[in-house]
Amino acid sequence: MRPSFREALSRPGILAFAHRGAGDVAPENTMAAFQGAVDMGFPVLETDIQASRDGTLYTFHDEDLQRLTGEPRSIGDLTDGEIAALRIKGKHQIPHLADVFEAFPDTLFNLDAKTDITAKPLAGLIKHMDRRDQVCIGSFSDRRINTVLRGLGSDTCHGLGLHKGAAFYLSARLHLALRFRAQCVQLPMQYHGINIVTPQSIAHAHRVGLKLHVWTVNDAKTMRHLIALGVDGIMTDNCALLKLELKNADLWR
């Protein structure tokens, strides 16, 4: 029986997210990084989705390919054949999302559609590969989240985009009992220098039925601070370190 994202959210403790896979094992968003995180026992792979000129979905974050491959153009400008010839850090291919789903059938996925053109095909692929129960849809764009939900159903696990996330934060500050359709809110520690992950915001999330996840945390001191605060999930590039800190706190699932 495959795992369910909603079921994972309902369990006590802290959910561990491998942010773009295990960056301490291999370059981000590569099969090797995903495999490294799964081998360590991480229940959730967080990854970003881009589309090629041919409409194929890939796990890749940046707007262009320069930082990781040396190619200055974006994935959206390239055909599948051109992308297949590229290598991340000179070694790793850019994975198709479909291949990642196939490689890790018992893993949960937190998926971020990075462009508007990816949202509708993302919903179609998730539906085609029967992964709806295993995904949580996130994005800075509330519009993209809604596009994916229209394709999959509004009860699909999802987070809050930027505007609804801001509404959540203001409702926490003003003690307003706003309700959200989402199951979680995923936040950085700070936004424009303001601490937004606080005991108040965590308690408010729980009052309005949301789990609060924090990104992207790569140092032990901050991990311990968040564990003590009682957040519901932590995203990291340093999977070995987060696993160690959760094990030390007797919270590793």
Image (cartoon, helix red, strand yellow):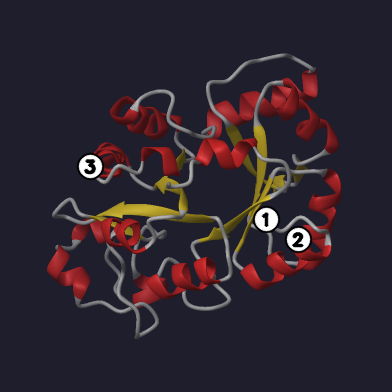
Look at label 3 and name its amino acid. Answer: His
> Which label number is shown at residue 246?
2
Above or below for 14 versus 21: above
Above or below for 73 versus 225: below
Q: Nearer the viewer, mark 2 or mark 1?
A: 1
Residue under the image location 16 percent in, 71 percent down: 82
**Disc 3 + disc 1, Cβ < 8 Å:** no
Residue sitting nearer the eye, 116 or 209: 209
Look at label 2 and name its amino acid. Answer: Leu
Q: Is residue 191 left or right of residue 154?
A: right
Task: Give the structural element (helix, strand or loop) at label 3.
Answer: helix
Residue under the image location 59 percent in, 66 percent down: 237
Image location of residue 231, percent across then percent down: 75, 43
Task: Give the structural element (helix, strand or loop) at label 1.
Answer: loop
Residue lying farthest to the front in this orientation? 1
Residue under the image location 76 percent in, 55 percent down: 251
Look at label 1 and name its amino acid. Answer: Arg
Q: Which residue is mark 1?
A: 253
Image location of residue 106, percent across then percent down: 43, 55
Q: Which residue is mark 3?
A: 128
Image location of residue 192, percent across then percent down: 69, 45
